[in-house]
Image (tube, grey):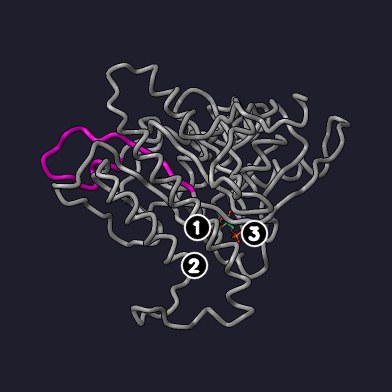
Amino acid sequence: HEADAYRTDLMTITRFVLNEQSKYPESRGDFTILLSNIVLGCKFVCSAVNKAGLAKLIGLAGETNIQGEEQKKLDVLSNDVFVKALVSSGRTSVLVSEEDEEATFVESSKRGKYCVVFDPLDGSSNIDCGVSIGTIFGIYTVEHSDEPTTEDVLKPGNEMVAAGYCMYGSSCMLVLSTGTGVHGFTLDPSLGEFILTHPDIKIPNKGNIYSVNEGNAQNWDGPTTKYVERCKYPKDGSPAKSLRYVGSMVADVHRTLLYGGIFLYPADKKSPNGKLRVLYEVFPMAFLMEQAGGQAFTGEKRALDLVPKEIHERSPIFLGSYDDVEEIKALYAAEEEN
Ligand code: P6P
């Protein structure tokens, strides 16, 4: 019977990307190779994250491995895996990681045409309490400059060619856009393959969830304060919004993408540029939101139009359902006028 037969038409992420690649006859498959190395990194981190709690319980953490190296913290380990996978792919020139103060410039024999900016394990402070965490990445192409420099990555998000995240939660889910919509793939651990489970994700135009750290409310500026007030005490008789805040960006953004609503990390008096990093948190999530029919705003402009000056620069961010972000844009515009 068809019903109980195994699904034989498995759309794996590799097959999906190859299908995309076939749309560009001149493509030499570089992106497919790059992505397969990012996918390898995600599978490794998924496995390590799922063992983390266990390791702690049975005291594996803190032991030294055969090289006599101290058991590394999960985010350092994740970073090492991604850097090594990306360099050995032979398809990258510059890497920027949340974990590394300086950019990584790939030596010439292994250099390729992509620059990857990533947070290998965002929200890692949440690991010990079992909250979902994630890897976030964005991909630029680099013009063939003889020596790569940070100029190759200090580019506006609107020049990114792809972006995505992998969430390590109840299941391991990779959400990716290469510029033709947003697609979700779920890891089938028995196959070790990411299978297309959420083709062409579209965010609802309006949601009834707002997601912000209310603990910072005393430091917010006028427009954010007004917007959150409206979420809680709507003037137009509509129901108040629900507050959902995990405190792990990938988890909060993933819920916003699937259920709709708005995620806010505003500027505040303590952090005038907010907390989230432009290159490897704001840009990739803004890219995905726009590809899914939503939008992302910094309080001043479209997030993807920001031009970062340094690789770990921060920016305020308001992203999610198109209509919800429109509302806060109007409040900031009104503030501009007076
Ligand atoms: P706060 C996690 O540390 C993180 O970088 C993001 O994943 C998350 O959205 C944000 O910080 C949470 O910050 O100040 O609300 O704890």
The residue lying at 28 percent from left, 55 percent from top is 103
Q: Which mark is residue 45?
A: 1
Q: CA distance from mark 2 to mark 1?
A: 8 Å
Q: Which of the 4 quarters of the picture holds residue 2?
A: top right
Disc on res. 216 = 3
The question of residue 149 being in magenta is answered with yes
Q: Which mark is residue 74?
A: 2
Please determine whether, in this image, residue 153 is positioned above or below residue 101. above
From which residue to which does the magenta span run?
Answer: 136-154
Front disc: 2 or 3: 2
Q: Tell me if residue 186 can be seen.
A: yes
Q: Magenta span has 10? A: no
Q: Are marks 2 and 1 in contact (CB under 8 Å)?
A: yes
Q: Secondary structure at mark 2?
A: helix
Q: Residues within 10 Å of mark 3 (few under 14, many from 20)?
A: some
**Alpha-carbon span between mark 1 and mark 3:** 31 Å
Q: Earlier in the sequence, mark 2 or mark 3?
A: 2
Q: Nearer the viewer, mark 1 or mark 3?
A: 1
Q: Is residue 325 left or right of residue 163?
A: right
- What residue appears at the point 74 percent right and 33 percent down from the top-left corner? 207
First of labels 1, 3 by sequence position: 1
